[in-house]
Every structure is written in structure tokens, then in C-alpha cells.
Amino acid sequence: MGVRDVKIQIREGEVLDYEGGGNLRDILIEHDKKLLREFIAATDADKSHIDFHTELGADAEVALMAWDDPEAAWIYRHSMSHVLAQAVRHLFPAAKLAIGPAIDEGFYYDFDVETPFTPEDLTAIEKQMKRVVKQNHRFEREEISREEARSRLAVDPYKLEILDDLEEDQTLTFYKDGDFVDLCRGPHMLSTGQIKHYKLLSVAGAYWRGDESRKMLQRIYGTAFVTREALDHHMKMIEEAKKRDHRRLGQELELFFFDDEVGPGLPLWQPKGTVLIDELEKLAKETEAEAGYLRVRTPHIAKDQMYHRSGHLPYYKESMYPPMELEGVTYYLKPMNCPHHHKIFDSLPRSYRDMPIRLTEYGTCYRYEQSGELFGLMRVRSMQMNDAHIYCRLDQFEEEFLAVCRMYLKYFELFGIEKYMMRLSTHSQEGLGKKYVDQPELWKKTEDMVRRTLENGGIPYEEVAGEAAFYGPKIDVEIWSAIGREFSIATNQVDFAVPEKFGLHYTTSAGGEEVPLCIHRAPLGTHERTIGFLIEHFSGAFPPWLAPVQAVVMPIAERHQPYGAKVLESLRAAGVRAELAQDQTLNYRIRAAQKQKVPYMMILGDREVEDSQVAIRLRSGENLDPMGVDAALAMITDKISTRAID
């Protein structure tokens, strides 16, 4: 039979050996053409995705990718973005194409058109997509020269710009389906008819390449799934997410808002929203005091020379507000609290006996996020950060780093967060001296320390290369809300570079000097992002300890109001955030309290006044048996003091 050089893993334990090389699609047809329906693409020996058009050389090893593989979604959603672009080009021939990638749970394509797309346009585009799918055009890959590529892309300036950014020796590939051709690396599924369950979701403005100085394009978002059931489930989740949208609930619950005269990305906190901030700060202060943290306060601005020393200039300059010139001195709004904390550490002599020193602050920072990236409380320009910096000896690192991770877990349990992931972000070799401090040995040492600490602590994590901070590896903490949406909420970072730049040191037991390690940590992230998450997670129905208004007293009639005032006084004396609602009808007041998601409604009528009791209605609609005021206070204050979820 001869030597069979190509190995194709079809399923676990099932490998196809094929002599010599050849086109993967042709090989599969020769073996069993049903495989082209059962699988979407393949991965090569480097775990890179390849499609069935790939030519396999001798000794190639590939594994087929099933449609239910999580990675498969990136391929078929990318293919559906081509179907979207093909439909738009058919209906709007003058549209200029930009980019169309797959994204988490969907895809999008950016277009340059004279007038913005309307909802009616999206309906027409989706109908045209159905025609393209029904026609079942095969995706065909073609390699061409740069000259021919420029000729094909003459009417698409955005594609030409992408082409000009590619390396001269890079292979240029186009994908064709039907009469539509697009510059694309691929891979793609075999044909447009393989995915039938998709939906266009929305259209929004998007600056070309995220640059506010460039033209705003029209971005059409869509999603696609292998089965109708999966698509229907996703659409239900989208509707649920809309109901829980922190931007909408923030307005309805009178928590925060934005104002054009104040500026984009600069939230204004209403009294009720400020209660959330106060409660989170109280929680952090209690937790950190128990763990031996020392609270500090620092100014909102600093001279540029401090940021040059820290490395924020130039590494972080693009995310900082423009400088201010005052009396010949350049100042910046602080993007982070760490340089100020380094100065506090350096203000006094430190001994090995003093270590670790844990400095903490809810410091306000300012970062100039691009306008197109701003999103409610999730991406803002002014943020209050649950920041702390732990200065420790090398032999203390594991214990301190693990204690921070356990603090995260404590908060997760408190908020009912059941799904989370610690993501270890490491450096990349090519980024040394550019994106990262150029100390390869220290990078390896600290990354190994973090891995070992997580493993010894039994904390699950995944590793991502190329996303570290410029001064050291970091843990990015991902959490999932009650409806399964993922949020990046906080970080835990190791800094081996900046303390030395600031000349930080402590006296060792031998009388010498040693530079401390610094752990940057923010378990509660920023108030803005954490509260945005909690609004969605609880759908605005915060647990009693966090609720801006914890109880509303409702006398049924005017004759019950004096008793209502006494009940209100008792609640407030016990530290309960309570209000008295005595205007409008009782049903109106109950609806208003439920709309504000108040945990407890105390309804007072003749019987309650006569028996010195209260009738409690929960926001769920459940009515509790009448009870005495003291019993009601004990129940409510217990929920609050223990920070029970509900």
C-alpha cells in the first residue's frame, strides 16, 4: 500500500492515514463524503484553524472539527459575516466594505454608506441573506498577487488600507461565494447553505479602526447558531439582558445618569446610587481592616515626571487625559493610584519586620477612553477604584497573593456569583522593550510564582499570552451574571519593575537593602463597573443590605399616619433606610415601591395600629403574617447585618 504520510484524526481514536499530500476536501470525499457534512473545518499540528480547501503536504497532521466544537462558532459566524456583506452589496451596490469578523456569540460587518441603515433595511438585508443561504454557494479560496489584489479592491478604500498594512511577503487570499469576493484569511465553512439559523440584531455607528478622527461607519450586528433551539435560547437571553440593562435600570431606579455638559463617560451619581457606593466602600473597609490594610488618600493629579518614572509615560500615554500646563509645570490627571502609593511607601524608613505593608484607597482615576468604546458604567472616563498595593518580601509573596485571590472568592460568594474564572495574563517575547519592561528573567520568575501560587491554592485559572501589564503578570478576573453574561471585573497584578524605578526598598535582617515586590489588587474593581454588573446580576432587585431604600412604610388612611411615623422612626433608629409613602392610593404606592424594587413594604391599617404590628409585603408579592414592630426590625436588620442575598 505504500507509505501513508498524511494523518487526519476524524474522531477520538479514529485516524485516517493518506499517502502523500493533497486537498483536504478531496481526501475526505474519497474516504467518506458524509464527513463534509459532519465536520466544519480542521485544526493543524499548530492548533490553527484550516478549512477544507487547504492543501496538505507530506507528513501533515490535522484533526477534524465538529460543528458543536466551541471553536466552530468562530468559523461559521465569520462565514455569515460574508453572507451579510454579500446581501448588503446586492441591495446597496455603492456600499463600501470595511471589516467583518466573528465576535463572542455573533458577528458584524462595517459598511460605508451614504445614509444610515434603518430597521426596514435590516429586514430587507436578512431576506437577501436567506436567498444567499438557499443558493448554497461554495466558499472558494484563492491566492493572488498584491497587484491583482489592489485591482480587485479599487472600489473599497478600507480594504486597500488593510492591504497596505500587510507585510509585503504575506500570502494574500480572497474568498469567493457566488458573485461576492472579499479579502480574507479565512477559514470558512464549505458553503453558504450550511448555517440556516441566524438573525440580524442591530445597527450602530462605529469609527473606522476605532479612531474618532476617522469616518463613522455603519456596523450591522448579527448572530448565528447550528440549531434553531440554540438561536431561540440566545434571542431570549438578549431580551432578558435588555430588561436587565444597567443603563436603563440606572435611570428607572434613579441611580446615575450622564449629561452632555458634564461630558461623555463621566457619570453623575444620584442619592440612591451613592448609597450603593457607600455600601460597597463599607464592605471593602471592613474586609480590608480585618486583613491588615492601611487606608490612605492621594490627590487626583501629579507632575509628569512621576509618570515618566512609573512608566505610564510613554507606555500608557494614549489612555491618559491630555496634560495641563500650570506655572511652567506639566500635570496629568492620574490614570492609576499606584505611583502615589509608591510615594507613601517611600516616605518612611521600612524594615523587613514592617513587611508586608498594605496601602488601600478608593481613589478616583481618569482615563481617556475613546468615545466609541464608552458604554454606560462599564467603560467610563472617571472611575472610583477599589485599589490597594501590597509591598512584601519575596518569601511573603505566595501567602499575600493567595490571600488576595481568596478575598475575591469571598466577594463572589457574598454576591451570589457562582461562575468565575481567574485569567493569568503573561507577556510576549516580541513585546519586550516595547509593550513590556525588558527584563525577561524577571518575567519568567514572577509568572512561575503566580502559577505556583494559584495551583497550590487550588484556584482554577486559564493562561493568556500577551495581555500582561507593562510591569508584570496579572490576573484578570472574569465573572458571569445570573443570566450568563461574562464581565471582566477586576485585576490582581504583580509588579517587579516599578518599585525599583521609584527607589523603593526596605532594610533586610542583615542590614542591607532589598527592593520589595508589589502586588496591585482591586477585588471590587471600580464602583462603576461593579455596580453596572450588580444592576444586571440582580436585575435592580438588590439584596436588602445593598438596596438604596430598604423599606417603605405605607399607612392605608390618614388616621394611620401617626402610627406610620412612629414605625418609620423605629426603622431609621435601627439603621434601616426607610421612607414614608402616604400620598396616592395604596395600590399606587405598592406599584411604585415594586417598580423601585424595595425589599420590604410595611402596610398599616386599623388592625396593625390596634395590635402595634406591621403587615409586610415583599417585593416578590409574597405577604408575611402580621408581626410586631420589634420582630420586623429583628428580621430586617438580621438580613442587613449578615449581608444575606435575600
Image (cartoon, helix red, strand yellow):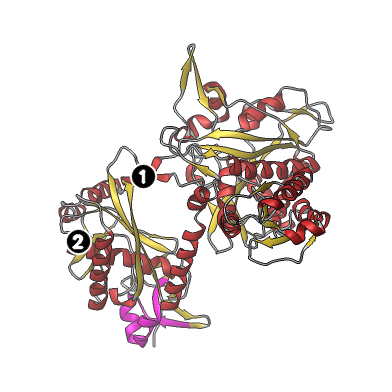
Which amino acid, mark 1? Gly
Q: Earlier in the sequence, mark 1 or mark 2?
A: 2
* Residue at 73% from the left image edge and 47% from the top image edge: 562
Q: Relative to the observer, which residue lies in front, 477 or 115? A: 115
Q: Tag 1, which secondary structure?
A: helix
Q: Relative to the observer, which residue lies in front, 598 or 428? A: 598
How many numbered markers are drawn? 2
Q: Which residues are magenta?
A: 15-42
- Position above or below: 340 against 29: above
Q: Which mark is residue 210?
A: 1
Which amino acid, mark 2? Arg
Percent x, y of residue 569: 76, 44
Can residue 101 be seen here? The reply is yes
Structural crowding at the residue carrying mark 1, measured as other residues with C-alpha within 10 Å and reported as few (<14), some (14–19) or many (≥20): some
* Residue at 59% from the left image edge and 48% from the top image edge: 531
Percent x, y of residue 283: 72, 45
On whether residue 309 falls in the magenta region, the answer is no
- Position above or below: 376 against 241: above
* Residue at 75% from the left image edge and 52% from the top image edge: 640
Q: Quadrant of the C terminus?
A: bottom right
- Image position of 498 (left or right of 401): left
- Position above or below: 228 against 606: below
Q: Farthest front residue?
A: 559
Task: Estimate the spatial distance between the alpha carbons at disc 1 and disc 2, rounded to whole Å.
Answer: 23 Å
Q: Quadrant of the N terminus?
A: bottom left
- Image position of 212 (left or right of 449): left
Q: Which mark is residue 135?
A: none
Mark 2 sits on what residue? 89
- Image position of 608 (left or right of 432): right
Residue 59 in which image quadrant: bottom left
Percent x, y of residue 194: 33, 77
